[in-house]
Amino acid sequence: MDVKGNIQYFDRSAKRRLIMCCIFASLLLLGPRIVGLFWWIFRPAYWQLAFSHWIWPVLGLIFLPWTTLMYLLVFAGGITGFDWLWVGLAVVADIASYGGSAYGNRDYIPGYQKPTTPPM
């Protein structure tokens, strides 16, 4: 039943798509963090070379996981020139992931009013 008391009927394919969407979203959210964690466990010297203190990679994996992983990938010889493009693209990916989730949950924000005219 939905909020108004109406009975909703789902076919199996719709329910399966909903579950697959949740799995995909979970992988996008947790994937880079899990990869970073395992990479840190199995290759700690590489992380120590890239970061001078342990707090920066922890904060990076929590708040900017794609940027942290890309920084590690391009850090091998130091970051110069074209390497900053890759780090910048990772920053955009992190911002897009936060922006996409905010846009998707905009109806749950207290005080949010839907626009009266449809967007063009």
Image (cartoon, rainbow, N blue to C red):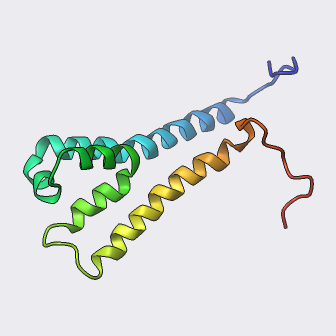
Residue 14 in the figure: left or right of residue 5: left
| Residue depicted at 88% across the width and 58% down the height | 118
Q: Residue at x 53, y 50 (%)?
A: 98
Which quadrant holds the C terminus? bottom right
Residue at left offset 40%, top offset 40%: 30
Which image quadrant: the N terminus?
Answer: top right
Name, please, the residue furthest toward the right: 116
Residue 56, image x and y in percent? 25, 49
Q: Is residue 94 left or right of residue 99?
A: left
Residue 69: image location, x then y, percent: 29, 56
Q: Position of residue 24 (x, y in %)?
A: 49, 43
Image: 96 above or below 17: below
**In the image shown, does 76 or 51 lie closer to the viewer?**
51
Residue 60 in the figure: left or right of residue 2: left
Q: How many marks?
A: 0
Residue 89 versus residue 69 in the image, above or below: below
Residue at 32% of width from left, 74% of height from top? Answer: 84
User: Which of the 4 image quarters holds residue 21?
Assistant: top right
